[in-house]
Amino acid sequence: MKVFDAFADEYGPEKVVFIYEPRCGLKAVVVIDNTAAGPAIGGIRMARDVSTEEVFRLARAMTWKNALAGLRHGGGKAGILADPHTPNKETLIRQFAQAIENLQGYIPGPDMGTDETAMGWVRDEIGRSVGLSKVLGGIPLDQVGATGFGIAICGEVAQEFSELDLEGARVCVQGYGNVGQHAARFLAERGAILTVASDLDGTLYDPDGIDIARLTEAKRETGKVTVYEGGQKLDRDAFIDLDCDIFVPAARPDVIDETNAGHLKCKVILQGANIPVTPKAERILHDRGILSVPDFVANAGGVICASVEYSGGTQKQAFETIEEKVRENTREILELAKSHTQMPREAALTLGMQRVSEAMQYRRGS
Ligand code: NAD
């Protein structure tokens, strides 16, 4: 099994479970990467092309993210191979939930293709999920924009370590979904201007600024950024050649790789998506003087919110915790990177490994 050769090491994964239910067509995988700090929290990704390898990598990213945020949770992730718009969605999610009922080391949350409704179905089946709607006592992290808020806090800190000035900064959001929309909104509250927004359908570009409320409404109604009245409509991947100050990748993994890292024109990257930049591309960007704040630091707002919800906290407490933890973490990592002339990702990994290793010391036989 090549995937183990490529991904298994002293940190994990602890458990990998494949689920197949031919009657309803459920094909899924759960990777519990590391539970030294507590049961793993990680989203359920539903996509037609989600791969086992992707879930392994995402689970590991959750281990680092949860450790860096100082949560009492390890990292894990699940992937369901299906179109998130399938009419069969509720059946698939409920069946998946039943299949993981005894997998107590994994607490599911929302990810691409799943939301608080899906988490409500999971909770109904097995009594265990995060990212629930308000009526179920949850903090709907996508509605309130927990991850986007953290990204904006990260942007505030990035100003101290780069030439970025949030006032008037031009923002490019690749993937105008839950994370992208709220990141744009919270960055705009700090003086930035959204000039590029893309989704699967295409890219919207307006150097004079896009009206975020109007674009979000248009996207909600039609699912497409290109229906927005005004601006230029370009191809899906046109964002790469458009000038901006802040680039927020908020869609799929590996969007920036060594073939296009040389084209990106920005001062700072705030990684909203998980693993959106390949390791080789990180190096190219760093050598070009672009400050790239890694995913497991920049997009931790969602899981911090989920963990506050899990321990019975309120939305207000969640936002206060996100602000405190993301600000502290970003500053610590960027300072470490600066003093060691490292890439921020290297500094963040060193710190993440250190914290997970410390937590693992408490395990029997360690
Ligand atoms: P979403 O489904 O709400 O939005 C994703 C958007 O990306 C959609 O608008 C889609 O059209 C667009 N998209 C997909 N492929 C694209 C492509 N190739 N080019 C351009 N646009 C594309 O998902 P989301 O919840 O916003 O999550 C986005 C990313 O952020 C994922 O990588 C997810 O794992 C990560 N993330 C999400 C959260 C959260 O709180 N939701 C937290 C941490 C990380």
Image: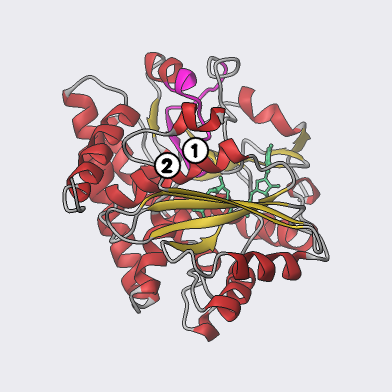
Within-10-Å neighbours for mark 1: few <14, some 14–19, many 20+: some
Q: Report, in whole angstroms, how far the alpha carbon at label 2 lies from the one at label 1.
A: 5 Å
Q: How many marks?
A: 2
Query: Looking at this view, is 20 or 31 the one in front?
Result: 20
Residue name at image x 26 percent, y 38 percent: 353
x and y, in percent, of residue 135 in the image: 54, 86
Residue name at image x 58 percent, y 70 percent: 119
x and y, in percent, of residue 17 in the image: 55, 51
257 above or below 178? Answer: above
Query: Looking at this view, is 9 or 353 the one in front?
Result: 9
* Residue linked to disc 1: 57
Q: Is residue 276 magenta?
A: yes
Query: Looking at this view, is 264 or 93 the one in front?
Result: 93
Q: Secondary structure at mark 1?
A: helix
x and y, in percent, of residue 70 in the image: 25, 55
The image quarter containing residue 24 is bottom right
x and y, in percent, of residue 56 in the image: 51, 40
Left or right position of 84 against 331: right
Q: Secondary structure at mark 2?
A: helix
The label shown at residue 60 is: 2
The image quarter containing residue 236 is top right
Within-10-Å neighbours for mark 2: few <14, some 14–19, many 20+: many
92 above or below 278? Answer: below
Position of the N terminus, as image quadrant, is top right
**Magenta-tinted stretch:** 263-282
Residue name at image x 43 percent, y 23 percent: 282
Amino acid tagged 1: Arg
Q: Main secondary structure of the magenta part?
A: loop
The label shown at residue 297 is: none
Q: Is residue 167 visible?
A: no
Q: Are marks 2 and 1 in contact (CB under 8 Å)?
A: yes
